[in-house]
Image (tube, rainbow, N blue to C red):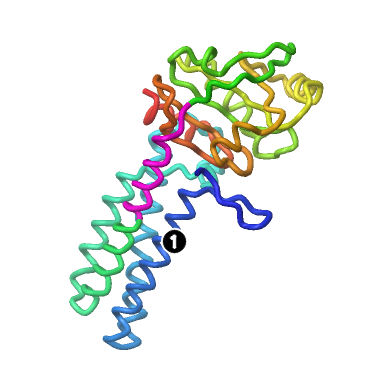
Amino acid sequence: MIAVNLGPLALPVSPLLTLISIIIGFTVTSFVAKKAGVQQKESASNALFIILLTGLVVGRFVFVLRFADSYDSFWQMLDIRDRGIDYMAALFSALVVLFIQLKQRQLRKALLSGVITMIALFTLFTLVITAGQAQAVLPDTSFMQLDGKKVKISDISQQRPTVVNLWASWCPPCRREMPVLQQAEQRYADISFILLNQREPTDTVEHFLQQNGLSFKHVLLDNKGDMATAMAAFGLPVTLYFDTNGRLVHSHMGELSAASLQQSIEQYLK
């Protein structure tokens, strides 16, 4: 499962579960610290917040440094909607701050309880998501090309790493990330890129591509949303990463930046 439907909203599963882990971690920290008094409760919560904030800031900073060439402006570097984080840097910096905070003896039990709870839940959720992804494979389904002919995704992939992007012309973040995908297709010649339009007629798709000067090797039409249904990918855009064996190894719901796309390709497909 890639997304969860909450009424009219479609939320990506991975960030949602991370947020749940953090909320429960704060709750445990506050509960344990409460026994030591109101002052300790507030201090423990503040200390945990500083730990998480440090990890987030450092993780983002290192990510931006690694992929600085992929950003066109300073404001793009600040835009965290692409969820670009260097997780090793974030974890290391958070642990350093944690050890510093543990010097305060009265906060040790509460902080360790909260941090261990967060790590345990995050690990559990990650294992569940990974196990679910392991069951997902590149479907042997035929979709219509813009010339009216049908083709199977597996025939396009031909046992190469494959990136499948689910999109629609009415979707603003889909439109914004199109140049990023086009540049990536030109850069990574050994990877198959498939732009799988969701539930739009051929003339609408062709007009959009021509109007925006976009050209891709493989643009397919998913008139019934079969791919999104099969992958439980509610909401757009969604980018799916398949390895040479056709197994889903990563997914990203939401707008891509050049940096986040590069990170995913290098981490999961190279």
Image coordinates of residue 8 in percent, x first then y, are 68, 54
Task: Please determine whether, in this image, residue 94 is positioned above or below residue 45.
Answer: above
At mark 1, the secondary structure is helix
Which quadrant holds residue 43? Answer: bottom left
Q: Is residue 103 left or right of residue 236?
A: left
Q: Is residue 29 left or right of residue 238?
A: left
Residue 128 sits inside the magenta stretch: yes
**Quadrant for the C terminus in the image:** top left
Image coordinates of residue 226 in percent, x first then y, are 63, 32
Farthest residue toward the bottom? Answer: 37
- State the residue at coordinates (75%, 24%): 205
Image coordinates of residue 7 in percent, x first then y, are 66, 57
Decide which of 258, 78 is in the foreground and name it.
Answer: 258
- State the residue at coordinates (58%, 39%): 255
Decide which of 109, 43 is in the foreground and name it.
Answer: 109
Label 1: how many Cα within 10 Å (few below 14, some 14–19, many 20+): some
Residue 120 sits inside the magenta stretch: no
Q: Amino acid at mark 1?
A: Ile
Report the residue marked by disc 1: 20
Task: Please determine whether, in this image, residue 203 is positioned above or below residue 59.
Answer: above
- State the residue at coordinates (74%, 11%): 147
Decide which of 265, 70 is in the foreground and name it.
Answer: 265
